[in-house]
């Protein structure tokens, strides 16, 4: 029985939420393993729109267990607010269907302060973060000074964690001209929120192992995308976690052998939100057309997403670094009506041809995409639910993508709606 990891293969917002929600019907457990509430995953079920940031996209299906793994950074106030919003809409969230790793590090208001202060100070060099405190929280995790979820259950432990954390942050804040942390207030806020989040805290590595042994299917839900990975992305314009499929293992406490199929989510064109290199970006009518038809506005921050042609060189690279066995190609319908489409097959730099994006930041801004042009289609693909409903030119476009990225299409998505999805290969049927 296969377990499946779903990961973004571009710069995020590829449609992971929609695909995880669709696949979750076939899964028993859905697990987030990295990132935090910088993610914005949109699900559309019978016209009802749900936007999830921290909760796994399986939370809307009754009878499934949703898990937040240790690789995530968790803002407890954001979690409680998200649960509250869902409950208001009749979705049940309880310790029966949500478990959170007791060793997950917390995002605190001081992390959001630092995120904001740094971005403001960076001026034009700003990364364009979501302002959620993600980077500073991960820094504290590897700096061995995080407050973790389980620490909230014991007052003495919490106090000693705060000692370590504030010794660092107060010094940092002094240097940045910010006021010191009001320790009593922070401790009080943590004590207040604790009873609302501790009921979910569990050794989830053990639960996951038990369920795997019992033959249950586990679906790992990645956030962000491979090009935002802290090692393999367009550094420093990245997020602060590993977004590649390998993180599904250490971010949950399951061995690497627990994942049999990595499904890469790939948008039929390219988008990016925030600053950083983007070789196929279109600053013209077509770019604006894609943004408008694709509703390319950030789910979390409402910022406009930058749009461009499909970059096969990049996706070939990210399918390799994440070990992708099949892709879910999304938003094909957004390309309806364009006379011709371009696909980037590689780059030119200093008179040389390269087939992948160089790691050097300076080169990343200078590469010139090499395009091939392919005919568009005038018919609508929106809402298509079978391969036979697709115009011939759309099929050719999909086939050419498969060839260039050297990876087959397992699923095709033709609208935001859950059921407007074409299954080619079932990732769970390994
Ligand atoms: P995620 O972060 O990867 O989950 O993606 P987002 O939810 O941030 O952004 C993807 C957007 O595209 C959402 O608004 C989805 O509802 C929408 N979407 C997903 N698949 C399709 C599709 O096949 N066609 C269209 N038109 N929209 C889609
Ligand atoms: P989902 O899961 C798109 C981007 C931010 C910024 C950079 C760093 O919805 O695909 P951070 O707040 O993480 O320190 O910001 O990463 N970013 C995303 N872009 N989709 C996301 O998540 C993102 N999460 C972070 O815009 O450029
Ligand atoms: Mg998103």
Image (cartoon, rainbow, N blue to C red):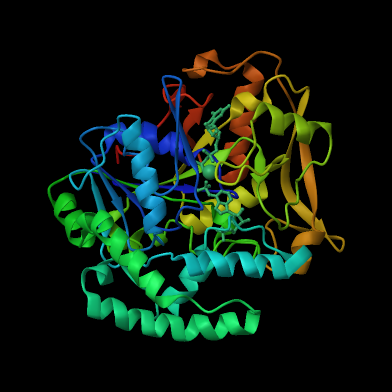
Q: Quick check: 194 above or below 418?
A: below
Q: Residue furthest right?
A: 351
Residue at 26% in and 54% down? 196
Left or right of residue 55, residue 352 in this image? right
The tally of labels here is 0
Q: Quick check: 240 above or below 184?
A: above
Left or right of residue 251, residue 129 in this image? right
Quarter of the view holding residue 296 = top right
Where is residue 89? Give x, y as percent: 35, 30
Residue at 72% in and 23% down? 376
Q: Quick check: 187 above or below 98?
A: below
Residue at 55% in and 45% down? 300
Residue toward you, 136 or 241: 136
Left or right of residue 137, residue 376 in this image? right
* Quarter of the N terminus within the rendering: top left
Where is residue 221? Give x, y as percent: 39, 47
Quarter of the view holding residue 342 = top right
Residue at 47% in and 24% down? 417
Where is residue 423? Give x, y as percent: 41, 27
* Quarter of the C terminus within the rendering: top left
Quarter of the view holding residue 115 = bottom right
Q: Is residue 254 visible?
A: no
Q: Is residue 114 visible?
A: yes
Residue toward you, 31 or 122: 122
Where is residue 118? Give x, y as percent: 65, 70
Residue toward you, 172 or 214: 172
Residue toward you, 47 or 3: 47
């Amino acid at each position: 029985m296969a377990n499946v990891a779903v990961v973004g293969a571009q710069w995020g917002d590829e449609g992971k939420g929609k695909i995880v929600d669709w696949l979750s019907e076939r899964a028993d457990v859905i697990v987030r393993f990295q990132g935090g509430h910088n993610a914005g995953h949109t699900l559309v079920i019978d016209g009802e729109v749900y936007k999830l940031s921290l909760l796994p996209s399986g939370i809307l299906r009754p009878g499934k267990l949703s898990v937040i793994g240790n690789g995530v950074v968790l803002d407890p106030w954001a979690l409680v607010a998200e649960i509250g919003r869902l409950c208001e809409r009749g979705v049940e969230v309880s310790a029966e269907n949500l478990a959170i790793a007791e060793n997950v590090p917390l995002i605190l208001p001081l992390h959001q302060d630092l995120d904001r202060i740094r971005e403001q100070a960076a001026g034009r060099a700003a990364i364009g973060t979501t302002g959620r405190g993600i980077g500073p929280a991960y820094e504290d995790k590897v700096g061995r000074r995080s407050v973790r979820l389980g620490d909230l259950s014991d007052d003495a432990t919490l106090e000693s964690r705060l000692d370590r954390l504030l010794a660092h942050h107060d010094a940092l804040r002094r240097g940045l001209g910010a006021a010191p942390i009001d320790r009593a207030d922070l401790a009080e806020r943590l004590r207040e929120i604790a009873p609302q989040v501790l009921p979910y805290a569990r050794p989830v590595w053990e639960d996951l192992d038990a369920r795997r042994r019992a033959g249950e299917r586990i679906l790992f839900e990645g956030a962000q995308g491979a090009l935002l990975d802290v090692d393999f992305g367009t550094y420093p314009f990245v997020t602060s976690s590993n977004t590649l499929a390998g993180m599904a293992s250490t971010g949950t406490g399951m061995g690497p052998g627990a994942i049999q199929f990595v499904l890469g989510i790939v948008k039929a064109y390219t988008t990016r939100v925030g600053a950083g290199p983007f070789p196929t970006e279109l600053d013209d009518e077509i770019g604006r057309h894609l943004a408008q038809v694709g509703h390319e506005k950030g789910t979390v921050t409402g910022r406009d997403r930058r749009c461009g042609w499909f970059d096969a060189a990049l996706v070939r690279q990210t399918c390799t670094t994440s070990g992708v066995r099949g892709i879910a190609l999304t938003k094909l319908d957004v390309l309806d009506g364009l006379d011709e489409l371009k696909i980037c097959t590689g780059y030119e730099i200093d008179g040389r041809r390269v087939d992948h994006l160089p790691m050097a930041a300076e080169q990343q801004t200078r590469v010139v995409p090499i395009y091939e042009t392919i005919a568009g289609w005038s018919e609508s693909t929106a809402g298509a639910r079978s391969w036979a409903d697709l115009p011939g030119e759309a099929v050719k476009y999909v086939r050419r993508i498969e060839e260039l990225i050297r990876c087959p299409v397992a699923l095709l998505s033709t609208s935001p709606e859950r059921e407007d999805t074409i299954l080619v290969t079932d990732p769970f049927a390994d």
